[in-house]
Image (tube, rainbow, N blue to C red):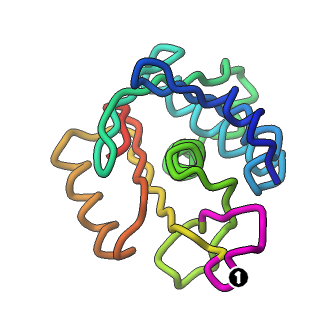
Amino acid sequence: MSNPATIEKDMQMTDGNYTFSFDALVRGELGLTASGGAYFAEAASYCLHVQSHPNPVRLSLSGDLSGTATLEWANITEAHRRTHADLQDAAEFGACAIGIIIAVKLTGLSGVERSVKGTGIDFWLVQDSDEHGIFQRSARLEASGILKGGENTIRARVNQKLAQTKPSDIRPHFSPPFSG
């Protein structure tokens, strides 16, 4: 599924600040296919572009872990606009990309597996090895994309998702850029 050395290169921590990129996701190293990971990463990059965020963008992390991070994202072309013109879908898929790369790094797990409908979550965080047996699915991830919203909108969505998932690990959004 993943090469830990490669993932570490893509998601480094210096002086208490994390640096994230979509590279491992795009290469298919986090449990999803390369094309699936690339689609999510493109959606996130497009949403960041639409909201005029700089590249790289600074993130604030809150929750069980607080701190700052930098996220490097891809340049956008006209083909990206055509592909991700539905901004609601782009925000949801983009939130998946950001949630995946942050969750994999911060949990130390090796990747994700798409969850089935009815579980209240989008992904299971998993380990490559089968040593955990029935506990292979080590953590849950519910991603919720908010393209544009203030603190009240974000908090309301976080509360809604917490009730839905009981609990999940990371809930990304796009404005302002932080995971909380």
Image position, residue 171 (x, y; %): 40, 53
Q: Which residue is mark 1?
A: 133
Residue extending furthest toward the front:
131
Span shown in magenta: 125-135
Q: Let me know if residue 52 appears in the view.
A: no
Image position, residue 78 (x, y; %): 71, 23
Q: Which class describes the residues within 10 Å of circle 1: few (<14), some (14-19), or many (20+)?
A: few
Q: Amino acid at mark 1?
A: Gly
Q: Residue at x 52, y 33 (%)?
A: 47
**Left or right: 55 with respect to 76?**
left
Give whichever of 36, 166 is nearer the camera.
166
Identify the image quadrant of the N terminus: bottom right
Image position, residue 38 (x, y; %): 75, 41
Q: Secondary structure at mark 1?
A: helix
In the depicted structure, whether residue 2 falls above or below residue 60: below
Q: Residue at x 83, y 47 (%)?
A: 35
Give whichever of 137, 72 is nearer the camera.
137
